[in-house]
Amino acid sequence: MRNEAFPVLLADAFVTVYGRRWLFDSSYQPRILLCGGGEVPFACARSVKRTPLKTGLGAGESVRYADFEGYPSLLFETRILIDSTTGFVDCTFVPLNMAGLKVKEVCWPAPLLADEPGAYAVLNTMQGQLLPADWPQPFGEKLPFDGQMGSEAAYMPWWGEITPQGGYLCYVRQSWDSAYTVHHPAGGPTRIAVRHLPSLGEMRYARTVTYCFLPAGSDYVSLCRLYREIADEEGRPRTLREKAAQNPQVSKLIGCCVMHVPGKTHITEGSAYYDRENPEKNDQLVPFSHWTQRVKQLKKLGVEQLYLHLDGWGQPGYDNQHPDYLPPCKEAGGWEGMKELSDTMQQLGYMFGIHDQYRDYYLDATTYDPDNAAMSADGSLFEFSRWAGGAQNYLCASLAPAYVRRNFEQLFAHGIHLEGTYLDVFTCNELDECINPHHPMTRRECIDVRNQCFHYLSAHGVAPSSEEVNDWAVPAQVFCHWAPYMEGCAIPVPLYNLVYHDCVIIPWMMTAGCWGIPQGTTGFMHALLNGGMGYMDEQLEGEALQENIRQWQVLRELQQHVAMEKMVNHEMLSEDRTLQRTTFSDGTRVTVNFKENTYQIDYPDA
């Protein structure tokens, strides 16, 4: 992690002794964007004072900006400090006086330039991608959640660029109040910039991004190794081995196939999915007894390990009336039918888990109270009506742990044996904040309470999962629903697994054409390459089911070797990138041919 030599700071560039001169984009205009439109460019300051900066930790430069026309009290500072121990470069925005200024975001520092032939950007959009500087398609206009970090827009709070002369990693320190922009027109070039977001409506504290420079010969794997070293030094990762020491369900989960099954579906008239032409399609029901018989059949067919994820188990139906979802759906079998399914899963040695939701807060929930909804900085409550349950706000996440406890204590009291649970959207959607004085919450505090929900489940012997994965959830999350590739990404690469494979278990949809599976490839090949879990299609029969079972058996053996190991390397072995290989810390190597749908697994003891 320690640079062999240090960058030298100039007025407009970093010059590293690795021989690569890193320039800021001079056409970029650092600025403060205001709510409701308008902006304050840094260049409009009539007083700009530059001061050499020297501390016990390093040296650099401070620039203080003041005397803005129309904003006489506005005062802020930028600081660039080269750490004398690591060689890392900290770029810090310091809001000295921004009182009364309704800030939407602060855009600083300018992007670094990496435009030479052979250069590419390394982006943590979902599982990850490489974006060559001359990539022929445009990219970046539609990042999920407007590029907000802590969401699927950035599973990890960093990006980087690699050139033939060297590379850099940019680590956003206060990622919970940050977003980023990628601008890449067809053919390039690529520009990546951070956007600092206000907290509870104000720029309340200093924001830092850290640049870490690497020498020629580095690549995207080098960036992943560097970031894991940084994360380890900061004490953030918690491995599956550590989680398994607390919760035995973690070890039991390894080698399972995942079967995601429906219960009750009810789509209200207020939902965007409501079918007015065929209203009978808005209500469907699969009783608990159906799945009780199905898992018995799978056991007879040789499926030794299974995790069943049950949707729509509550009385209102899937995605309805959360968080007031109890009791179990009477038409599906009620408490008795759900307990029979739970008991059967336990008798078969299978694992039983349920879908649950503590963010979408439905207006027709039994105990709905608008005072419990997350209140935006302007005093408004977010409201929309997309999902099956119709009109909703967002539940303030500070209240979620109490609702989780309330509901799960009832499940436990009725003898429902749960070994896993899925808390929807927590690791996929953006972090929330709330200005309600009864339960104020920053985005940073939102991280803590979402993780608190996961920790509660682990403490009760339940393996916690959520929709996708995220850097902030690594201390608590055990597995997810999926963590695939962003639609429209350039060159998909498993960046998240290269950093955190030994910390979180990731399942993959098995066939081609599934959401998040790159075009022309199958999910089974990605599951192999990533040493991950695989899905069991609940509707398959006959030879198709047997083939799904055969695929799971291969994944099961692989997972039993590598689930708790680091992914230490990923390689493109062919020019068209259809032949790829991963290597794990135990020495296991997996080579897949996406073109031919073939694979080879080399175990170290073979």
Image (cartoon, helix red, strand yellow):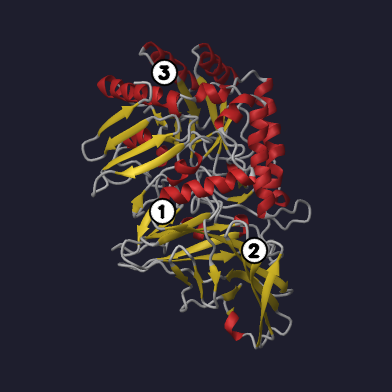
Q: Amino acid at mark 2?
A: Arg
| Residue to which mark 1 is pinned | 218
| Residue to which mark 2 is pinned | 207
366 vs 38: above or below: above
Q: Do the numbered discs 3 and 1 sit on residues whose CB atoms are within 8 Å?
A: no
Split into 4 quadrants, where in the image is the C terminus? Answer: top left
Tell me: 146 left or right of 74.
left
Q: Say which label, 3 or 2, has the lower sequence index.
A: 2
Kind of element beneath mark 3: helix
Q: Say which label, 2 or 1, has the lower sequence index.
A: 2
Name the residue located 37 percent from the left edge and 38 percent from the top edge. 582
Q: Is 23 or 551 nearer to us in this picture?
A: 23
Q: Amino acid at mark 3?
A: Arg
Tell me: 5 left or right of 280.
right
Kind of element beneath mark 2: strand
Q: Dot 2, how many residues are within 10 Å of its Cα: few (below 14), some (14-19), or many (20+)?
A: many
Name the residue located 48 percent from the left edge and 18 percent from the top edge. 289
Name the residue located 33 percent from the left edge and 38 percent from the top edge. 581
| Residue to which mark 3 is pinned | 294
Q: Do the numbered discs 2 and 1 sit on residues whose CB atoms are within 8 Å?
A: no
Q: Do the numbered discs 3 and 2 sit on residues whose CB atoms are within 8 Å?
A: no
Q: Nearer the viewer, mark 2 or mark 1?
A: 1
Q: Amino acid at mark 1?
A: Ser
